[in-house]
Image (cartoon, rainbow, N blue to C red):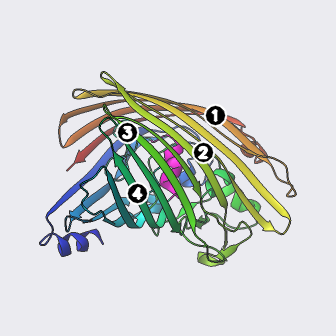
Amino acid sequence: MLALLIAATSLRAQDYVLHAYIDERLVAAPDDTSWTNGGFGKTRYGGNQTQLHFGGAALYGAAQITPDLLAMGQVQYQTGDRGRVSLLEGWIRYRPVSTTPWRWSLRAGALFPPVSMENDGVGWTSPWTLSSSAINTWTGEELRAVGGELELEHRGEVSNWDFRASLFRRDDPAGTVLAIRGWSIGDLVSGIGTRLREPDAEVSEEDETPPNYYDPFRSIGASHWGDYVAVSWHAPGETSVSVMHYDNHADPGASAPYAGGDEQYAWRTRFWSAGARTDTGAITWIAQALDGYTTIEPIEDAYQRTHYRSAFLLAGWNRGAWRPALRIEHFSTLTPSSDIDWSQSEHGNAVTGALNWRPRSYLRLTAEVLRIDSTSTLRAEYGLPARIIDTQLQLNVRLLY
């Protein structure tokens, strides 16, 4: 899709850009089975193995077709269950030329909601660490807006403001992973048309044969539109503050068949997110917090509501070829007892330390250590230790274009 877009527009476009990356990594994984393989481990890799892994590849393209019209798309390739090329996002933006402090634009297509304050690289990656925060791991897995977004900007002499509002479809399963397995930390990003794996223990309890998958980007039940609104303030020196509210307006009682006849449910998911970013000399600071809940009602008058929250603080060195970064974060979920005889909770903390070396513009080498200490009643229900400490080490070589 991206290749066709560039081929069709580049001859007429005023300007266009292409960026890409591909990476290979050596990983020392913790003992617990990763969520990517149907376990309750919190890291991308598991199984107590040290081996080479293909980390992924992505391609970004943007074409300025006219002074008012911009087309953009990102595709990626991942191995394993996601061993295919998929579209991360693709949209067209109309933004008329403005000669006043006010400017407006309209985007339409498949969009990332403006949640992240750390993932702004090709393939929705972070320049600071290999593993995204828990907030942005979930965002990359389950949040995508297929619809339109209106942006209104005011450019002042000292600072700028912008307001975004969106109506979207195809995000009814958002919140599933937080309710059935809890938070995780990694760098896998779901593309349109890919699938996510449910925990094998959950599937076996329902007398089904694992593995079981679901489509994170689809509409389920009656026709409806989700929405989000976001307000941001930008000041000189890379300083910004952002607040956002998201609600997919899914019908918590709706379901629809998925591949193989399995039933996939809609989850009514809402959250508030707030974040800030600033530089103090050579150090960049990023802080973000997210709080919300997701609800399902598979049986009339019987519902399950999972409250979730997470927050992190990241500090990174922003000068020179050597750029260390440190991130600390906390996360939790709570499903109180309800009419459904089922409850769970989890809480945990994580520390991520990364050392990035960029000797050339096309080469980035990263060493990262990730330690996650979490306690979950859900694991205990399946006879696993309630508390686990996952430590994952990665040495990464990434080629960039």
- The residue where tag 2 is placed is 183
- The residue where tag 1 is placed is 348
The residue tagged with tag 2: helix, strand or loop? Answer: loop
**Stretch in magenta:** 132-143
Quarter of the image that includes the N terminus? bottom left
Instruction: Return the disc, 2 or 3, that comes first in the chain's sequence.
Output: 2
How far is mark 2 from mark 4, CA to CA?
Answer: 31 Å
Q: Position of residue 377 (x, y in %)?
A: 75, 41
- The residue where tag 4 is placed is 151
Q: Is residue 139 magenta?
A: yes
Above or below, 66 against 45 in this view is below
Instruction: Return the disc, 4 or 1, that comes first in the chain's sequence.
Output: 4
Q: Is residue 307 magenta?
A: no
Q: Position of residue 300 (x, y in %)?
A: 84, 69
- Residue in front for this viewpoint, 390 or 130: 130
How far is mark 2 from mark 1, CA to CA?
Answer: 9 Å
Q: Residues within 10 Å of mark 2 (few under 14, many from 20)?
A: many
